[in-house]
Image (cartoon, rainbow, N blue to C red):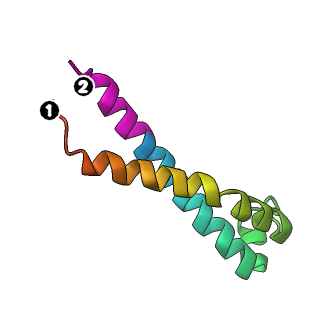
């Protein structure tokens, strides 16, 4: 018998990690193209070079999380 609590926890973890990766991916992409605005908004914390480095490093984790998210959705909802 499947452990429904573990499945639901795994779904939630993947969901929130994907959301965080998406927000960070968008922020760093914006930080590359509009670096002056992002540098001022983050008080110099996110420079253009750092945004580019993070943006490039997020590609593989983002794809893995997206595939996991799609796979979990294709399995169907679990009963509560």
Can see residue 37?
yes
Quadrant for the N terminus in the image: top left
Quadrant for the C terminus in the image: top left
Q: Is residue 14 above or below residue 61?
A: above
- Disc number at residue 41? none
> Of the residues under marks 2 and 1, which one precedes in the sequence?
2
Does dot 2 land on a helix, a strand or a loop?
helix
Q: Which span of residues is magenta-colored?
A: 1-13
Residue 60: name its quadrant.
bottom right
- Disc number at residue 79? 1
Task: Tell me how many marks there are.
Answer: 2
* Residue 32 pos. (x, y %): 74, 75
* Residue 41 pos. (x, y %): 71, 68
For the residues labelled 2 and 1, the Cα–Cα distance comes to 7 Å
* Residue 29 pos. (x, y %): 66, 72
Residue 44: name its quadrant.
bottom right
Label 1 Cα neighbours within 10 Å, binned few <14 / some 14-19 / many ≥20: few
Per the image, the residue denoted by label 2 is: 4
Does dot 1 land on a helix, a strand or a loop?
loop
Q: Is residue 48 above or below residue 60?
A: below
Q: Is residue 8 magenta?
A: yes
Q: Nearer the viewer, residue 31 or 8?
A: 8
Q: Is residue 5 magenta?
A: yes
Q: Nearer the viewer, residue 50 or 39?
A: 50
Residues tagged 2 and 1 counted as in contact (Cβ below 8 A): yes
* Residue 16 pos. (x, y %): 45, 45
Label 2 Cα neighbours within 10 Å, binned few <14 / some 14-19 / many ≥20: few
Residue drawn at (78%, 69%), measured in percent from left and top? 39
Most common secondary structure along the magenta stretch: helix
Residue drawn at (72%, 57%), measured in percent from left and top? 57
């Amino acid at each position: 018998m499947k452990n429904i609590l573990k499945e639901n926890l795994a779904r939630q973890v993947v969901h929130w990690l994907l959301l965080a990766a998406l927000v960070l991916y968008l922020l760093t992409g914006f930080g590359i193209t509009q670096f002056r605005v992002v540098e001022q908004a983050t008080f110099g914390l996110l420079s253009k070079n750092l945004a580019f480095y993070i943006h490039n490093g997020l590609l593989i984790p983002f794809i893995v999380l997206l595939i996991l998210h799609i796979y979990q959705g294709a399995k169907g909802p679990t009963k509560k």
